[in-house]
Image: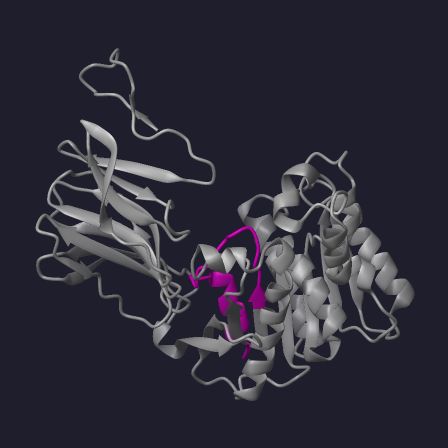
Amino acid sequence: MRLLPLDDPHAAPLLVSPRVKDREYAVDERDGTLFILVNDTHPNFRLVEASLDAPNAWSEVIAASDSHYLLSHVSFANWLVVHERVNGLDQIRLRDLDGREHYVPFPEASYAAGLGGNPEYRLDKLRLAYQSMVTPQTVFDYDPQARALTTRKVQEIPSGYDASQYVTERLMVPARDGAMIPVSIVYRKDRKKSGPLHLYGYGAYGLAIPPGFSTVRLSYLDRGFTYAIAHIRGGDDLGRRWYLDGRAEKRWNTFHDFLDVADFLCSKGYAVPGGISISGGSAGGELMGVAANMRPELWRAVVAQVPFVDVLNTMLDDTLPLTPMEWPEWGNPIESADAFALIRSYSPYDNVTAQAYPPMMVTAGLNDPRVTYWEPAKWVAKLRATKTDSNLLLLKTNMGAGHGGKSGRFDSLIEDAEELAFLLRAFGLAG
């Protein structure tokens, strides 16, 4: 990064620090002091400071930590504000000019929070964005002196919504190797115990799945579903290492985590085996394919949206435009026999077997540049030719859409309704 003074745009740019392989850093400035977020000593980043006169001479402000994942920072005239995740939950840390620190107190056990628009250099009130699986999108103002939150705006739900009828929980589930997997859950207070449960998972590319609010999800909850999100390895929910521990040669951790979460929820009475529907898209669709192959008896139904299921063939085809850039994520089976064997061991298309599968709904997009439409088509064709059951197996190919499905507010809601109708039929709740 290079800096220019606003009062002299023709000045020579000031280099903060030269490039170093695998190092990332981000810079903010306050009255001649640079605050720099950097991953030089730990993948979860630390915060250092330097002067404009010696921008590459760093002194540590906040040390790196296994449990604290520093995401971003903003320096105000009177406060330094850091957005981080602590054991998987969003936190906002405020540090005054004397180095005294505190965290914003949020009201729920599971939620998603971040910084809103804060254009004033002197901070009297900090604007925050907040939501949970129960609380709609909310704008807070936080008074750092009184340490109090004031609600400024809450998303309106036109059909009506009573948050007091719902409960959200956050569980820590033991994986088979001892790792603790966060799980976010929401349900109506009047739901039937061990009723239908829907479990969502993704687990790839270092993308965390925030436990935020969804109006579409209310359609599940009001029909008696419990809805759970498994924050499995492959995402960075618990920090950068959480991502690395589900990537490439460690990919099996992602699949095992998802299955371990399902078994745990059954053991604790949230669901029963065969009473769980699951969904995921793209790399999460790969997860759906592995889950369906390995433990078909656990699932009442599976929804795989634009699923990346022909992993081995795709990673072997370097003429596809995205394949070379995907090798760091999955491995290069062209050059590595180990990568070939690993991908072959889980690739959903290559592991379809003659067994009974649950009802499945699979989607594809003709114009999808990420997961080519023939991947889900091949997978469905092989399932139909191999599986031993007569359960419903649907393939829907959007002829005018890409990776994200149909665009437009109402068309996307129609697709959500199709998915829910499929799941209700699988549970015998349609009609």
Number of marks drawn: 0
Image quadrant assignment for residue 271:
bottom right
Percent position of residue 61, x then y: 21, 49
> At x 18% / y 27%, what residue is drawn?
53
Percent position of residue 48, x then y: 25, 44
Q: Quadrant of the N terminus?
A: top left
Q: Is residue 180 toward the left or the right of residue 154 in the image?
A: right
Q: Is 357 placed above or below 330 here?
A: below
Q: Quadrant of the C terminus?
A: bottom right
> At x 65% / y 78%, what residue is drawn?
429
Q: Is 225 placed above or below 127 here?
A: below
The furthest residue to the right: 385
Q: Main secondary structure of the magenta part?
A: loop
Can the viewer see residue 220 in this picture? yes
Image quadrant assignment for residue 150:
bottom left
> At x 55% / y 82%, what residue is drawn?
264
> At x 57% / y 66%, what residue is drawn?
200
Percent position of residue 104, x then y: 22, 61
Q: Is residue 228 toward the left or the right of residue 306 in the image?
A: left
Q: Is 430 placed above or below 115 here?
A: below
Region of the chain picked out in magenta, as a range:
200-225
Closer to the camera, 258 or 276?
258
Percent position of residue 58, x then y: 24, 39
Colour style of the rendered protein structure: one colour
Q: Is residue 10 toward the left or the right of residue 242 in the image?
A: left
Can the viewer see residue 197 in this picture? no
Closer to the camera, 310 or 140?
310
Is residue 191 shown in magenta? Answer: no
